Image: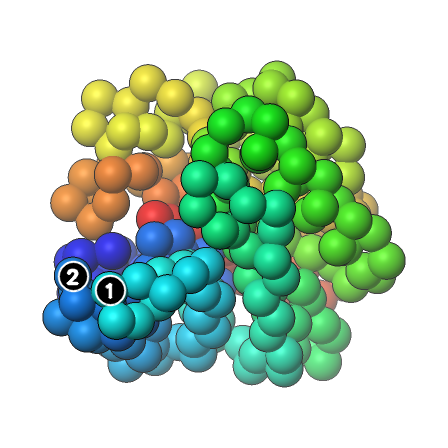
Amino acid sequence: MVDLSRAAEVIRRTRADVVVLQEIDDGARRTDGQDQMAVLSQLTGLQPAFGAFMPYQGGHYGMGILSRFPILESRNHRLPDGAEPRTALDARLQLPDGSELMVCGVHLYATAEQRLAQASRLVELYADNDLPMILGGDFNSEPNSEVMELVEAHWVNADKGEDRLTFPATEPRSEIDFVLYRPADRFEVLTIDVLDEPVVSDHRPVLLVVKPRAAHSTPNWADGN
């Protein structure tokens, strides 16, 4: 991610409570040695978590989560490698009513076979998780692919409607970015939008607004690259 100020402006404007971000640097030369999650946290007022995929240019490259809610714990789980190492970054959050929520971000890569192995490991990682869960990110996989069919067997894929294409940000041709949740009876989907923000990312951000059932808050869940 290059334009942190613009990304922070989008986050503030959408009033997102939780943001899952891909392609984040921490201390890499190509982004002037910045701790990008720390900068985004300062600009948005949200609490950060970072998960490194690999060392890169004197720092690390990976992905992050921003949360308006307290992060009780974050973990970075190694997934089967593709052309580059990959992980699943999760955060256990405490909602205003005292309940807890699990949020996980992914960036699957690179071949269909490698992505399927990564998705299979993802299913294994959270098989015993009994918290309500939001899963978002760049799956690099189209709807009805073997990867998405596997993921959708364990999470509900929020239907974006007619405006669903997410990549590339200008003249999008593919739907490869998704926000999913489980269990189905713990969330009420209010809206889901794909945003036109070509300066922020080469992907279009996905904004999901859900109401946890029997909860007092209405969090906004955003996924962006």
Among the 4 quarters of the image, the one containing residue 133:
bottom right
Q: Where does residue 23 sit, x and y in percent of width and height?
A: 34, 53
Amino acid type indicated by mark 1: Gln
The residue beneath circle 1 is 57
- Mark 2, Cα crowd under 10 Å, few <14 / some 14-19 / many 20+, is few
> Residue 19 — which label?
none
Q: Indicate left or right for 75 with 63 as reference.
A: right
Q: Give the SS element for disc 1.
A: loop
Q: Residue at x 51, y 22 (%)?
A: 142
The residue beneath circle 2 is 30
Q: Where does residue 203 sit, x and y in percent of width and height?
A: 31, 38
Q: Give the SS element for disc 2.
A: helix
Q: Where does residue 11 sit, x and y in percent of width and height?
A: 32, 60
Q: CA distance from mark 1 to mark 2?
A: 7 Å
Amino acid type indicated by mark 2: Arg
- Mark 1, Cα crowd under 10 Å, few <14 / some 14-19 / many 20+, is some
Q: Residue at x 86, y 58 (%)?
A: 128
Q: Residue at x 68, y 66 (%)?
A: 101
Q: Quadrant of the N terminus?
A: bottom left
The reply to whether callout 1 and callout 2 are in contact (CB within 8 Å) is: yes
Among the 4 quarters of the image, the one containing residue 76:
bottom right
Q: Indicate left or right for 18 with 42 as reference.
A: right
Q: Residue at x 19, y 74 (%)?
A: 33
Among the 4 quarters of the image, the one containing residue 94:
bottom right
